[in-house]
Every structure is written in C-alpha cells, then in structure tokens.
Image (cartoon, rainbow, N blue to C red):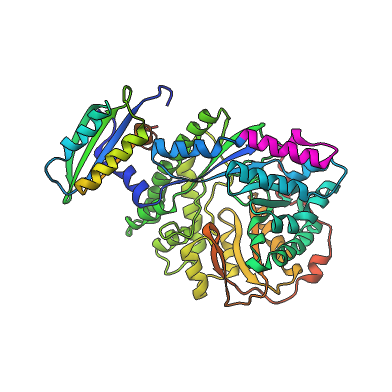
Amino acid sequence: MSGYFSPQEILETIRMVQMENLDIRTITMGISLRDCAHPDLATAASRAYDKICRAAGRLVAVGEEIEREYGIPIINKRISVTPVALVAESAASDAYLLMAQALDRAAREVGVNFLGGYSALVHKGMTPGDRALIASIPEALAVTERVCASVNVGTTRAGINMDAVAEMGRVVCETAQRTAAADGIGCAKLVIFCNAVEDNPFMAGAFHGIGEPDCVLNVGVSGPGVVLNAVEKAPEADFGELATVIKRTAFKVTRMGELVGRAASAKLGVPFGIVDLSLAPTPAQGDSVARILEAMGLERVGAHGSTAALALLNDAVKKGGAMASSHVGGLSGAFIPVSEDAAMIEAAELGAITFDKLEAMTCVCSVGLDMIAVPGDTPAETIAAIIADEAAIGMINRKTTAVRIIPAPGRQVGDHVEFGGLLGRAPVMPLNRCSSAAFVRRGGRIPAPLQALNN
Amino acid sequence: MHEKSNRIIVTVIGVDKVGIIAGVAAVLAEANANIVDISQTTLREFFTMIMMADLEHASVPFDELKRRLEALGETLGVKIDAQHEDVFKFMHRV
C-alpha cells in the first residue's frame, strides 16, 4: 500500500481490533491536589472538586473522540489524584469523608467510573493525617460509589510497617461489613501496597504521586486476547520462540497505547506521562490472562508450571513493550485477578488454583493477590498476615505487590460473590485456618532488607 | 506523527460480488475523499480490498464517512472498515 504497509499488516491490525479485543484499557489523568490544601476541610474539598472538574472536564469527550478517530476502543477513562492524606491533613478537622464525597461528586460530574487516590503512604510511619484517612476508609468506600482507596504499607527501602499492616487487616474487614449487602464490594476498591508506584493508571490502586507534575496523562494498554491468539498459533514453538511471539505482539499492542497517549495528551494540552504495559484481563470471554497460560500447555491455570509460564509471559510482554514506547512506567506486568478473569474463575471453581498458588505466582508478575473472595468470618489478623506475606514478597524482590481481598460477609467456601461489570464474580476460596494473631500483634516495623542498602 | 496525515485505510472483507469497488469509490467520491491507492487480494475464499484515501479536502468528518462505509457494507453483505493511517503506521513502523 503506497510502499507503506503490506496487506498482511493491515489485516493483522484489523483482526486485532475486531476479533481479539485489542483495546486501550484506560487513559488515566493524574491530577495534583497539593494546591487544594486548606485549614478548612470544606474549602479544601471544594477546591479539589473544582480542580478535578476543570482539569478533567474534557477527558471523556477527548477519549471518545480518539476512539472514533482511530477506531480503537478506550475502555476506561479515569482519574488519579494526590494521596488525599497529604492534602487533607492541613485541615483542622479529621472528618475526611467530606473529601471522599467531593471526589465522588467530581468523578460523577466529569463522567469517569473510578477515581483513585483516597490514599496514604505509611510504609515507615503514620502522620495524624494518615491515621485519619485510614480510619475513614470503610465509611468512605461504603458511602461513595467511584472513589478508590489505597495504602502503601511497605517499601524495599523502608521495610514493612507492621502496625499499618495490622490496622489494614481491620480496615479490610470493616469495609466488607459496611458493604455487606453487596458482598463486601467496598473491598474491591481498596488496595494495600508494598512499593506502590506513583504513575499507575490502573484502578483501584492508582494515585498521583508527589513527584508527578500538576497534571499528566497515563495510558494502560491491555490485549490478553491478542496475546492469546498469537500463543495459540504457535502450539509447537519452544520457549525461545514462544517468548519472541509474545514480544512481537506486545510491541504492537503497546504502540497503540503510545499512539493514543500522544493523541490524548495533545488534544487535552496535558503532558504525556507513561504507557503501562500491563496485561489486564476482564471477565469477557477472550480477554483472559489465565487462558494464555493454559494455551502454553497447562490444563488449567494453577497447575504446576503456572508460575514459570507466568514468568515467561510477564517478561516477554515487558521486553516487547519497552521497545514500543518512549516512556514505560506504572505497574507494567500481567495482572492475575481472580474475579475479573473468566479462566481464573473456572480454575478456582474447580479447585485447580489455590490461594497459595496465587501467592506464588505474584512473585513473578504484577501485582499481587487481586480480587480474591475469602470467607466472611476470616479474622482481621489473618487478613493482616496475608498482607504481610505479600508485602514481604514485594520488599525482598524490589517489586510492587498488592492485596485486594474481599472477606465476603456471611459467605463460606463454596459460595459465590457477584460484583458485576468489570469486577466480575468469584468463588469464595479457602484460607489456611491456623491463627497468625500472635505474630501480627507484635507490631513495629520489619526492618528494611539488605536489598535496600545499594548505595 | 509530527506531520499530521489525514489519510485513512479502508478495508473490505467478504465474498466477492459485482459492485464492491464501485460502491466504496462512490461513497468516497461523494465525501470528496481522494483515493490514493488501491489493492485487492483473495485471502482463502474471501475477497479482500484495501484502499488508501486522503481526507484532506473531505466534505464530511471521518466518523460520518466510517458510518456510511459500514452501512454500504451491510447492504453489500461484506465487512467494510475504515481506520486512520496512524494506527497502522504506529503498529508496524517505528
């Protein structure tokens, strides 16, 4: 075609978009709220509302314009803001719910389905503002619809704040109780991190870090369907060839993210931050990360070999994607949520994948134990211990890990919870019933590991 | 991406029949879109036509043209798709 493209190249692109769910998963606008701080919390909240509406007023319209122009669906348009604890703590009041409600109204006003950044960074300790924010999380997630919360409890440099871990165990349980009527859906909007990143465009863990500019646009690409198709076409390939197939595909998918990011940033007059190379599944058929692992030759995800398969996939996606974008960032890795991935749900129902296998798999991918429903009577100390385990994996391996777990009130192993939409559905998975309470009660900090001493 | 191109790529995939090219060309001409290049192959049993058109002086916006082409595809019983050239440029060229 005019010396430009071969028919094969053109048809490949058309096929990816039309048949394999190639899409841009999210364009996320990061907005700093640092200039909204005020001694009067109501004033701070209204400043935040105004700034978000001003900065993101055209976000959804521009996203839709780009979808029309390029014919590539952009599934989500979202917003991340400065961790609210940093903004709200200048105020005399600690009724931070006011902030959550202002953010919720702003999200509704500009038409985004989720806004992240009801957050605190407490990996080494808590300020009064952090404490007030964390205390308000259960109610905030119960009374708002679109606000997402996250708390960073550990880093490789600082170690793990076990007081915060214990507190978050209680917060998760209380959040579930407050949203009991909807199977504890509040917990689907709460992420507990180790080594949280400042430019993550994916919910529920997105926030706008303090090293970020006033306003920035980050893009999350996806495309499990495209990768699955490529893997299925290479049933005989050895691992070297398989990695190459995935790399090539990831490159092409990421280029679309780069295109959309540049276009959106130009149209909005906002700097382009990063492309996040994550493979993010949705409950839709053909949009599953677990199915890719199965296509590599595993009967079900969770079978022995799953961790190795995921390691190869995750690495190849990064290698291919890194070449395709001028700025790669965010989480950049395959996500393995349970409720949001059709093949993962099936494997969990069959008992093919267990909680412990999921934990092992998080050592080699981003991000962590994600969207897992567990029995409603799970003690807060057990949830805290799960968070501690996951944070330890992140701390030692210098990677981001996270926990987004739902102790579904009144549910037992074998029951199902339904969250609907992109959040999907999940079978309640069994946990180890032995107590971790005395361990969690020790409190204090797990010291930073040797890995931190690299200067 | 620096010099903003206004070219689109139209693809037609389906069972070959009389009037496909004429139909697409007519829709493009009506929109004052200039056909830059055209190629045609058969992929297995499917007829595949790829056309590059320049919308520099087009009288209708891209999304309206895309709708018209899709509607034509429905009447002809083929799948017609139009996408901006940048999509292909980004995916296949660095």
Q: Position of residue B46 (x, y in %)?
A: 18, 49
- Where is the C terminus of chain A found, in terms of image quarters? top right
- Where is the N terminus of chain A found, in terms of image quarters? top left
Residue A424 higher or lower than A222, as above or below: below
Judge whether residue A150 can be spotted in this image: yes
The magenta span reads: A33-55
Q: Position of residue A31 (x, y in %)?
A: 66, 37
Q: Position of residue A19 (x, y in %)?
A: 34, 52
Magenta stretch contains residue A50: yes
Q: Which residue is found at the position 43% from the left and 59% from the top? A: A292
Judge whether residue A324 can be spotted in this image: no
Q: What kind of secondary structure does the magenta stretch mostly adopt?
A: helix
A31 relative position to A60: left or right: right
A94 relative position to A292: left or right: right
Number of marks drawn: 0
In the picture, residue A379 is in which quadrant? bottom right
Q: Which residue is found at the position 48% from the left and 60% from the top? A: A283
A8 relative position to A280: left or right: left
Please name whichever residue, A109 or A97, is drawn nearer the observer in this view of the structure. A109
- In the picture as drawn, the residue positioned furthest to the right comes out as A92
